């Protein structure tokens, strides 16, 4: 059994500063005793100089503090020092690994290490009335911070309790469960998430937001205990001004991203709550339960008046997480539907905030260059020369459509001297064009042929072996038959990683046969093409460089958010079919002046900057990081195959070739196998226990009981463990036994 996958530790955060909050208003203008550290008005000491960013809505914002050390704190106070030096001078909080419970005075309890200021860092408080062991908020600020082990984002959680909080501000701080830097305040510009709670708008730490709104337009200034009640009154009146947080606030622009950061924190908090509502990989109860829950939520309707955006986002996040088929869950293993890298999701948020569109340079200056860099990386990995090109797409279906489109137009120009851009398919070519693909090829090949006016019958299925690989001799025979019928082989489609078996067609001999018959050679590597990201060349992709075009999907074995498809061509001139001149997007004189035209690369006009998230992952992981992910997922597939083989009631269909495992449950009556396997999968779905794939073999396997229905594990989560796979396999066996015991159809 291998060790559980461990990612590389993150790089140190940079020292981005936040300056939009300067003071903390205190109840009725009172200043907490002991708040003598420069730059603070009571409240949270050197963690952040206020409980900024709306504690009512469960958000804390950490402020940059310079280089304060513990010598800045006054002896006997609960303000601790060295609070911001978590390997950086920025917005992170340094805490001590201690499991002791703090005493009521805020001083370290007996046995607790006291490496910080008395009553400060080193003491640990445990919130007995909170399931998350969260920080306690007292009348004048932060009480205690304790371990937060159930937060996916490793952020602080807050409750309005005050039971252990001291009246003079910071009480104690504890270590977050699994990070050296502890509080991840740098990711969203210092936003720390918190538990929502109800609080009186006129008392306690709720006033902190008013203070920050009141002073947002001023330069940061040092406030001390001479702050007047007039300031507090001004802060209180500012509570009515929530314009910075209104639903119509923009995500970017000169005013910055402060509101977006708060919204993101709220929706992420909702996601964690939804996950806590139901810990399974998808919601229980089946389609009816989900339909009822969504209907009850009101999401999807357009009301006359809007609702509070924070509550809206928190509720939405909670509903989505509860009602999601979560690919990050180890028991969600049905489809080529990968869990996403956090670094890519964060980059995706930046793309969405800036809303770049890659249909012209003046809508996406940097994003267009980033896409060009990502495409160049992938074309080189595929073995293409610098004369190649490519574009990001919505996925394999669009990329395969583009491959067949270019193949059709290429053969019409070469063989029929036609101009398909202006005249379409000439009458003498209608019904004669043929596409040859494996009988295991993706269904989009036939569907796209229909889209192109060729009809699904133009696709000739070529036989594959028992492992799902196209047989070159069968292709040669099919191509000869096409020529004998005076038809035209428009394209040969090879597959690198079939959906079910994960099989790789032998690309090199297929390429030679396509060339011999004058056919375009397209390779659908939507699944297996992810192997190009690693450090080690994979022999199964040998011959890929001979392809005229290639489909890659980085939202499969690339761990990117959907969509992240890619279409590559060996010769950039092949994209002439897509060229279009539109005065307001790519004027000739602009292009002559050095402004690149982006319009002739894609089927789409408006196009998201989907390459940005991939670029972030490329830079953060490097080839070595991707190789570890690839190796781990393939290792898990091999382990799962062995677990299936060991189970007395399960039958392994074939050895895994990539990360998919085909198998089935064998009931006492083998003739009932198809019904039982379909029903046990639905049983697991209905219970919210597991998401398994289902497929049907093209033909029955020799030497096995009858039936074509198979279950499928698609293992794309490198954080899944072997014990989790064992438990999932056992659950399948138990569900099969339960279904087999029932009589009649399910």
Image (spheres, rainbow, N blue to C red):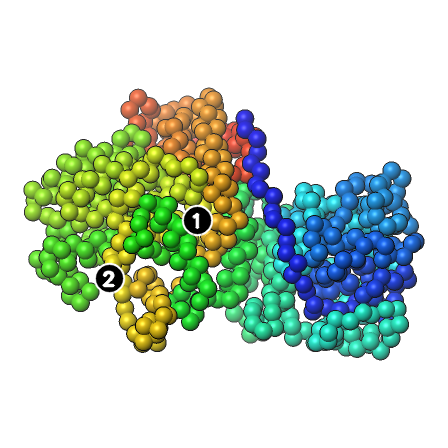
Quadrant location of the N terminus in the rendered image: top right
Q: Quadrant of residue 582?
A: bottom left
Position above or below: 236 against 622? below
Q: Nearer the viewer, residue 162 or 115?
A: 115
| Label 1: which secondary element | loop
Q: Nearer the viewer, residue 421 or 336?
A: 421
Give the CA distance from mark 2 to mark 1. Answer: 27 Å
Which residue is at 20% across, 65% downward?
421
Where residue 645 sits in the image (x, y, percent)? 44, 23
Q: Nearer the viewer, residue 630 or 326?
A: 630
Where residue 710 sits in the image (x, y, percent)? 38, 34
How many residues crowd around disc 1 within 10 Å: few (fewer than 14), some, or many (20 or more)? many
Which residue is at 34% across, 67% downward?
597
Horizontal side, residue 330 vs residue 481: left or right: right
Q: What mark, if any, has residue 577 been given in the picture?
A: 2
Where residue 538 sits in the image (x, y, percent)? 37, 36
Q: Quadrant of residue 137?
A: bottom right
Residue bearing the label numbered 1: 555
């Amino acid at each position: 059994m291998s060790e559980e996958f461990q990612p590389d530790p993150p790089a140190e955060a940079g020292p981005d500063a936040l300056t939009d909050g300067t003071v903390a208003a205190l109840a009725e203008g009172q200043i907490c005793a002991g708040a003598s550290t420069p730059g603070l008005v009571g409240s949270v000491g050197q963690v952040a100089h206020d409980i900024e960013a709306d504690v009512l809505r469960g958000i804390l914002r950490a402020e940059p503090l310079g280089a304060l050390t513990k010598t800045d704190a006054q002896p006997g106070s609960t303000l601790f020092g060295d609070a911001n030096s978590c390997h950086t001078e920025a917005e992170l909080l340094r805490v001590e690994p201690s499991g002791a419970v703090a005493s009521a005075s805020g001083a370290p309890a007996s046995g607790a290490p006291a490496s910080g200021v008395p009553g400060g860092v080193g003491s640990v408080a445990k919130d007995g009335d909170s399931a998350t062991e969260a920080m306690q908020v007292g009348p004048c600020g932060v009480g205690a911070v304790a371990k937060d082990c159930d937060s996916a984002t490793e952020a602080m959680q807050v409750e309005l309790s005050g039971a252990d909080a001291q009246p003079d501000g910071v009480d104690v701080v504890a270590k977050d469960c699994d990070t050296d830097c502890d509080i991840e305040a740098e990711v969203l510009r210092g936003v720390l998430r918190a538990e929502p709670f109800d609080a009186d708008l006129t008392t306690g730490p709720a006033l902190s937001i008013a203070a920050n709104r009141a002073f947002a337009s001023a330069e940061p200034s040092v406030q001390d205990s001479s702050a007047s009640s007039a300031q507090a009154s001004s802060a209180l009146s500012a509570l009515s001004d929530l314009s910075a947080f209104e639903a119509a606030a923009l995500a970017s622009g000169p005013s910055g991203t402060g509101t977006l950061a708060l919204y993101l924190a709220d929706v992420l908090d909702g996601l964690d709550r939804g996950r806590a509502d139901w810990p399974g990989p998808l919601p229980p109860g089946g389609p009816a339960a989900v339909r009822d829950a969504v209907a009850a939520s009101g999401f999807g309707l357009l009301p006359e008046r809007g609702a509070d955006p924070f509550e809206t986002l928190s509720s939405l996040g909670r509903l989505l997480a509860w009602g999601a088929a979560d690919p990050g869950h180890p028991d969600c293993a049905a489809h080529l539907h990968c869990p996403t890298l956090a670094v890519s999701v964060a980059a995706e948020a930046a793309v969405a905030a800036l809303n770049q569109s890659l249909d012209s340079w003046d809508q996406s200056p940097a994003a267009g260059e980033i896409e060009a860099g990502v495409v160049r990386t992938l074309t080189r990995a595929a073995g293409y020369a610098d004369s190649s090109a490519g574009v990001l797409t919505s996925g394999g279906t669009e990329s395969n459509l583009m491959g067949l489109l270019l193949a059709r137009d290429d053969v019409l120009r070469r063989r029929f001297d036609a101009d398909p851009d202006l005249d379409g398919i000439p009458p003498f070519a209608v019904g004669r064009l043929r596409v040859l693909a494996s009988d295991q090829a993706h269904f989009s090949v036939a569907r796209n042929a229909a889209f192109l006016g060729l009809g699904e019958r133009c696709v000739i299925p070529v036989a594959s072996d028992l492992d799902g690989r196209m047989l070159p001799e069968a292709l040669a025979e099919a191509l000869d038959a096409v020529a004998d019928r005076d038809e035209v082989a428009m394209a040969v489609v090879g597959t690198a990683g079939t959906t079910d078996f994960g099989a790789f067609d032998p690309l090199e001999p297929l390429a030679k046969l396509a060339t011999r018959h004058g056919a375009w050679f397209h390779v659908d590597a939507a699944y297996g093409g992810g192997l190009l990201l690693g450090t080690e060349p994979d022999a199964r992709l040998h011959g890929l460089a001979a392809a005229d075009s290639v489909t890659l999907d980085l939202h499969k074995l690339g761990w990117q958010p959907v969509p992240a498809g890619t279409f590559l061509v060996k010769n950039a001139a092949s994209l002439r079919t897509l060229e279009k001149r539109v005065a307001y997007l790519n004027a000739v004189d602009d292009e002559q002046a050095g402004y690149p035209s982006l319009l002739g690369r894609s089927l789409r006009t408006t196009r998201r900057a989907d390459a940005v998230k991939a670029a972030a992952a490329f830079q953060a992981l490097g080839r070595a990081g991707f190789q570890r992910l690839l190796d781990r997922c393939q290792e898990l597939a091999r382990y799962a195959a062995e677990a299936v083989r060991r189970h007395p009631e399960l039958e392994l269909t074939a050895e895994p070739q990539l990360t998919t495992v085909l198998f089935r449950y064998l009931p006492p009556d083998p003739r009932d196998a198809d019904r039982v396997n379909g029903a046990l999968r639905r049983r697991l779905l209905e219970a919210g226990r597991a998401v398994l794939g289902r497929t049907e073999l093209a033909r029955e396997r020799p030497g096995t009981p009858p039936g074509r229905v198979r279950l499928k594990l698609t293992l794309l989560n490198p954080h899944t463990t072997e014990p989790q796979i064992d438990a999932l396999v056992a659950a399948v066996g138990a569900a099969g036994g339960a279904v087999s015991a029932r009589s009649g159809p399910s």
